[in-house]
Each structure stands twice: as C-alpha cells, then as structure tokens.
Image: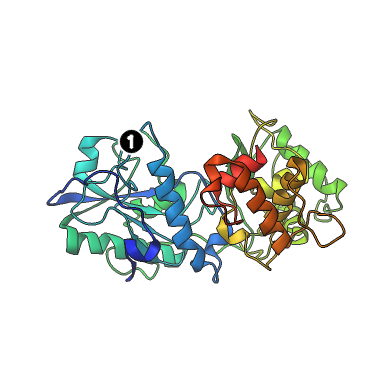
Amino acid sequence: MHFVSREEWGAQPPRYDLVYIASTQGTKVHYEGTYVPKSLAAADAHGSCAGHMRDIQAAHLANTKEDYSDIAYSAVVCPHGYVFDGRGAHRKTAANGNQTLNAKDYSVCAMLGASGLVQPTAAMLDGLVDAIEWLRQDGDAGSEVLGHRDGYATECPGEPLYAWVQAGAHRPDGSSPGGGDTGSGTEIARYQVTINGLAYGYGAHGDHVTAVGEALVAKGFGRHYQEGPGPTWTDADTLNYSDYQVRLGYSGTAPHEDADGVPGAVSLQQLLGYLPGATTSTMVPPFPGRSAFVLGRSNPAVVTLDKALVRKGYVRHHDGNGYQPGRLFTRYTLANVRDFQHARPELAGDADGYPGPLTWKLLLS
C-alpha cells in the first residue's frame, strides 16, 4: 500500500476532538460528487494530489452547515492508487449521512467526480482495496463493503464506482477481496457527464446537444459528421469534440482522458461562450485543479484565467506588449493573480499568485 500520512499531505489539525470508535461493521465507498479534473489522473500529476486533498479538507472545514471537525472521510484514494489518511482508523467518520451510519461504517472516498474524472483508474481500484484492508487490519472494520447510497438517499459513489462495489469490490486483477472490471476497454468514449444540469456524451439528447454540434461545425470541427449535427449525441459528436479539445491543447484521446471527446465545463464554455442550463449567466466553470497552473507550463484553463484578469483589470504585469490571454502560465500571470489576491481580504493572507478554488471562484464570478 502507498500510504500518505496527514503530516505528509499537509493536513490542518481537527477543529474538535474526533470521536473514538472501537470497530465498525465495514466500510462505505464514496466519491467527491462534484467536478474533478481529468488531468489529476495523468501519469505525472500525482504531485497535485496532496493539494487536492487539502482542498477537500478546506471545503469540509468551511461548511458551516455541517460544522465538520475535520475532513469527513476516514481515507481518500487518488487516481494513482495512494491512500491518504483522513480521520483514520478508530475515529468516527462524518461522511455517511447521519450519526447512526457514521458509527456503523468507516468511509473511503475516491478522488472521482460527477463530471470531469468520472471513471476509476485501475490504480485507484487497487488503492481502494488497500484502504479497505488497512481499516480492517488497523481499525477493526468488518467485512461489509457498501456504497454511500446503501442506506442513505444519494447518488454517491456514482454509477461506475457503485457497479464496482456491487460486483464485489475486486482489484482489477480479480484478487482479494473480490473481482472487478473498470469497463474502460472501449476505443471511443461512450459515457456521459452532467454540466449545469444537462447531460453530454454518448446518447445525451436535447437542443443543447445540437448547439454544441453547430458550434463545432462553425469553428471547423465537423469532419466526422455524415449528417447532422442533431439533438442526440453520437460517436461523430465525440470525435469532433475530441478534435476541438486537441486544438485547445488537451492531450490523451482514449476514453476518460482529457481529449476523449466528452466535454468538461471549461472547454464547453470556451466553445459556446456560456454554459447552457439553469444559471448560464452566472455559472462559474469548475476549478480545473492546481495542476493546471504550473509556472512555465501550458493549459487551456490559463486562457479562462487570463480573460478574467483582463476583465477585472489586473494586467499591470506584462512583457511590454500588454497583457494578452494565452495558454502559458507565465511569471506575469503569477504576478497579476497575486495582485488580485492582495486586493481581496479573504485571499490576502495567502497571496502566492497560484489560483486555488476560492481565487478561481472570485476571479471568474
């Protein structure tokens, strides 16, 4: 098992003392349920997972309604199979829905979303089994393995992960404690994501699907259409959207990679100029992850960031030709983001120039 201690991932201390539990009946499997960037699963992106873990904890500690004392999960598993210590063994979780369920089972969360990264990697499935076995050995967890939705009304842990749980929560090679299949062997992406309440991907239907197809054709990405575009998402839509993603600078055209032809909120907003759905005028694209903003590296999300800096007037740092939006995260980008952070009281205490979820939300709202 690749285990990451709280000290290693930079955990904040619990706000209150955590409740001791001697044992549980088993373990509940969770996912984040929001947007998780596909780029987090890239082979060279594991360095971003500790920061993602800190973001999860910070979001939980900021949840005044739930008044969490710490990150809610017993453990969290990243796409690379590392097990991050959360509340840990012999500590009652806060993730299962109510006090009775929290005392009944531990909770293990996959860094998996309802959009973006939605399919568990083979390494993640291995890591989930590692986490379950660790809680059995060190936390006296029972043999039960369930999904969060078992016993509580929720979509968690999402369809792909729940199917794995129901099949026995196996490692990909079929070994202990069961057997399983990630279902990722197809050559073209045929899964759906939900963005702002609307479905995209193979089989999705509606006027919003037609709008995507028409926008792709207008931008020169329609070569795979034999007829259409139309209101039902087909393989042709996926292939054309993949071409568009590649042009934006995304890489990886296999299913569940960044340019697989299934939209993310950032690329969709760049294509259409807005996000269709219930709140199109005020919708902020999901935070693309800290790995999108690395000094000297390119990412399409930097264009969105730059346009927001220009719109809000934080452009005094540039190379002499004015500040222009682009994919490269430069020292000028860093300095302009820092200026924005200094100007906001809620950001000024940590104004390092690198966007986090709150910087992204405030800058783009």
How many numbered circles does the render carry? 1
Which quadrant of the rendered structure holds the C terminus? top right
Whether residue 256 sits left or right of residue 90 in the image: it is right
Q: Residue at x 75, y 58 (%)?
A: 248
Answer with left or right where residue 86 lies relative to residue 291: left
Q: Can residue 268 be seen here?
A: yes
Q: Is residue 183 left or right of residue 320?
A: left
Residue type, label 1: Asp
Report if residue 330 is visible in the image: no
Instruction: Return the residue found at the far left.
Output: 22
Residue at x 26% of width, y 46% of height? 93
Under tag 1, what secondary structure? loop
Label 1 sits on residue: 67
Q: Nearer the viewer, residue 324 or 322?
A: 322
277 and 286: which is toward the camera = 286
Q: x%, y% of residue 332? A: 73, 60
**Residue 212: image location, x then y, percent:** 75, 42
Counting from the top left corner in percent of width and height, residue 159 is at 45, 47
| Of 258 and 204, the residue lying toward us | 258
In the depicted structure, whether residue 27 falls above or below residue 4: above
Give the residue displayed 25% in from the left and 63% down from the top: 133
